Amino acid sequence: QVQLVESGGGLVQPGGSLRLSCAASGSIQSINGMGWYRQAPGKQRELVAVITSGGSTNYADSVKGRFTISRGNAKNTVYLQMNSLKPEDTGVYYCNAEGVVIPGKLWGSNYWGQGTQVTVSS
């Protein structure tokens, strides 16, 4: 089966930085896109940033200029560099893989990681 594992979360002071990592494993032929979503307590899960296999990116307005999403040299990895962190960035960050094609399937499927906690507090 396909598995996504996030890492890099933690506690950081306002203005600090964190780098989140996500690695997908399994019998994966291709992934159309990968992204990061977050969910704060009492709020809906929201898109943070996405990147396609071709390298196109899209960011939530609230993180533009502060966060950068990128793909690793290995195509099954994605990173989120978070700078100038604010308390409102606090939440559980989830990695998402879209259009994952595996052997035996005629179409792609979506997968989610287990999430990693990011807390921005003084």
Image (spheres, rainbow, N blue to C red):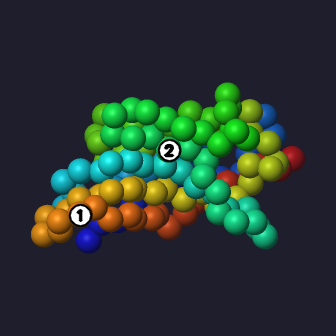
Residue 80 lies, in percent from the top left, at 54, 41
Snapshot quadrant of residue 65: top right
Confirm whether residue 16 shows in the render: no
Residue carrying label 2:
50
Residue most toward the left? 104
Residue 101 lies, in percent from the top left, at 23, 59
* Residue at figure coordinates x 74%, y 49% from the top left: 89
Q: Earlier in the sequence, mark 2 or mark 1?
A: 2
Front disc: 2 or 1: 1
Q: Amino acid at mark 2?
A: Val
Lateral position of residue 94 relative to residue 98, left or right = right
Lateral position of residue 115 relative to residue 12, left or right = left
Confirm whether residue 35 shows in the render: yes
Does 85 appear above or below 29? Answer: above
Lateral position of residue 47 relative to residue 55, left or right = right
Residue carrying label 1:
107
Residue 41 lies, in percent from the top left, at 76, 67
* Residue at figure coordinates x 56%, y 33% from the top left: 68
Lateral position of residue 76 relative to residue 90, left or right = left
Q: Is label 1 in a helix, a strand or a loop?
A: loop
* Residue at figure coordinates x 54%, y 38% from the top left: 58
Using a 10 Å C-alpha cutoff, classify the residue at mark 2 as few (fewer than 14 neighbours), some (14 to 19) or many (20 or more).
Answer: many
Q: Amino acid at mark 1?
A: Trp
Using a 10 Å C-alpha cutoff, classify the residue at mark 1 as few (fewer than 14 neighbours), some (14 to 19) or many (20 or more).
Answer: few
Does 41 appear above or below 32? Answer: below
Does 46 appear above or below 57? Answer: below
Residue 73 lies, in percent from the top left, at 31, 34
